[in-house]
Image (cartoon, helix red, strand yellow):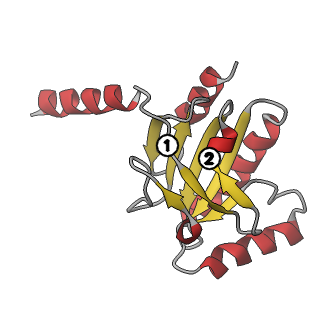
Amino acid sequence: MRALTALLLFLSLSASAQAGPPVQLTGSTLDGQPFSLAALRGKVVMLFFWNTDCVPCVQKMPELRANAAGWRGKPFELVLVSTDRERAAALGYLQTLRQVEPNGSALPALWAGDLRWTAPLAAPAAVPLTLVIDAKGAIVTRHAGRIAPEAWDEVADLLP
């Protein structure tokens, strides 16, 4: 049984490591600006799906902002996608963040209810979920749950 579990885990990890076709995601940011994932082609993108009721998600925000700031000037973009039931919850969190940390909300922040996407991209059943997308727009890996340090290593490996 352990061998079968290990084999299935290996196969699922191998499959997730192979980039697929470019994913499509369009809509607007919580600030009302147009957003298109296609406009970020040429950059490595980390999509972080979260919501304000998810304690691990909110706890991860300082690390996300710090890493994004550390890679400023590199072809990298961190995009936050709130899955809150109400748009106002995510907007309220980001407004509070702006008051506490003026540069803390400089990341593109989206609400899933405002977005249009194509398969294999869809709103996740559970958060946090992190997708690493290569410069060609293909999902390279998915990380369910807390962001593993390996996710940042994957981003670094994809950068020129």
Residue at 75 percent across and 42 percent down: it is 68
Q: In the image, residue 73 lies at what x, y percent?
A: 84, 32
Near mark 1 (Cα within 10 A), the count class, few <14, some 14-19 or many ≥20, is: some
Q: Secondary structure at mark 1?
A: loop
Near mark 2 (Cα within 10 A), the count class, few <14, some 14-19 or many ≥20, is: some
- Residue 28 left/right relative to 142: right
Q: Earlier in the sequence, mark 1 or mark 2?
A: 1
Residue at 71 percent across and 41 percent down: it is 77
Q: Which mark is residue 116?
A: none
Q: Which residue is mark 2?
A: 37
Look at the image and tell me in which quarter the C terminus lies: top right
In the displayed structure, 98 sits above or below 139; it is: below
- Residue 16 left/right relative to 69: left
- Residue 66 left/right relative to 122: right
Residue at 88 percent across and 57 percent down: it is 103
User: Are discs 1 and 2 less than 8 Å apart at CB?
Assistant: yes
Residue at 41 percent across and 27 percent down: it is 17
Q: In the image, residue 57 lies at what x, y percent?
A: 57, 60
Q: In the image, residue 26 lies at what x, y percent?
A: 59, 56
CA–CA distance in space, label 1 to label 2: 8 Å
Nearest to the observer: residue 29 or residue 12? 29
Q: Which residue is mark 1?
A: 23
Answer with the quarter of the image where residue 98 lies: bottom right
Answer with the quarter of the image where residue 11 lies: top left
Q: Secondary structure at mark 2?
A: helix
In the displayed structure, 143 sits above or below 56; it is: above
Look at the image and tell me in which quarter the N terminus lies: top left
Does any portion of residue 148 appear in the rendered image? no
Residue type, label 1: Val
Q: In the image, residue 150 lies at what x, y percent?
A: 53, 31
Residue type, label 2: Leu
